[in-house]
Image (cartoon, grey):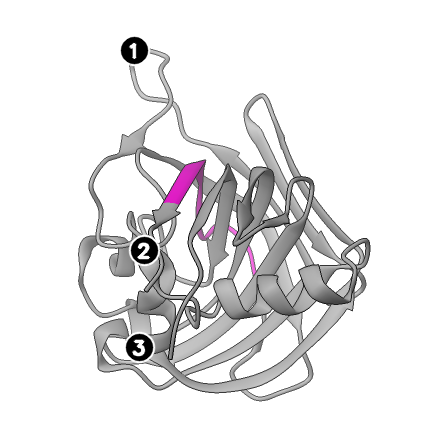
Amino acid sequence: MSSPEYELSGEFFELCDCFAICPCWLGRPPDDNRCTGAFGWSVTSGHVGGLDLAGRSVVSVSFHTGHRDGGGQQVYVFVDEGADDEQYQTLVDTFTGRNGGPLGELARLMGALEGQERAPIQLVSRGNFITVTVGRVISGDAGVIRGGDGEITVLEHGRLSEVLGTPAEVGLSTALRIDVGQAGLSVEVKGRAAMRGAFTYRSAGA
């Protein structure tokens, strides 16, 4: 099966129910051997094939037990409601790994795509603060952690860098609520792991 060429750039967001730093970033099993998280991508520029995807957003909710490399993740994908039909399906395919390239790992890790739908999405990064909102289903707020020198704490070359980005700014959530309505894919916590950063994905296709 052929996959399209693509190049996408923008900002990523990640909030989950692990304690900071989420062990998945370090290639380790998650806290309590289970992880529920929301992963957001705000595309500022780029295309898949000849399709322009600038200005579009995607949020993926995932749940897994054990080491993430064991696969078997349950995933639910939201695409911003401004996407037309072609953009919608292309974004779902790309951010579930079906289009290969650096995001291809997402397909290898997936056990089941539990659902996909359009929704109003807000991914906001302003100063020290991060906000991720998907309709009435997901709401998350976080702040970055600054070190003794006043600079934002960052993680470079982490295990998730290929499918998110590097460096990743380390943060803590003030609140995270996910209510997809399915076991494992719903959680409500605070003071847990958060990350943000820039991404650039390039694939020559196949």
Magenta range is: 189-201
Marks 1 and 2: which is nearer the front?
Answer: 2
Real-space CA distance between mark 3 and mark 2, rounded to the nearest whole angstrom: 12 Å
The residue to which callout 1 is attached is: 149
188, above or below 182, in the image: above
**Residue 12: in magenta span:** no
Q: Amino acid at mark 1?
A: Asp
Check disc 2 and report the residue beneath it.
102
Asked if the residue at tag 2 contacts the one at tag 1, i.e. Cβ–Cβ closer than 8 Å, the answer is no
Residue 187 spot, x, y in % from top left = 58, 72
**In the drawing, does residue 176 fall left or right of residue 87?**
left
Residue 189 placement (x, y as % from top left): 55, 62
Q: Amino acid at mark 2?
A: Pro
Q: Is residue 151 left or right of residue 181?
A: left
Image coordinates for residue 64, horizontal then vertical, percent = 38, 79
Residue at the image point whose x is 42% and y is 39% from the top: 199
Mark 1 lies on a secondary structure that is: loop
Q: Quadrant of the C terminus?
A: bottom left
Q: Is residue 15 above or below residue 43?
A: below
Q: Residue at x 18, y 64 (%)?
A: 28
Q: Are marks 3 and 2 in contact (CB under 8 Å)?
A: no
> Disc 3 marks which amino acid?
Arg
* Residue at the spot of label 3: 108
Circle 3 — which element?
helix
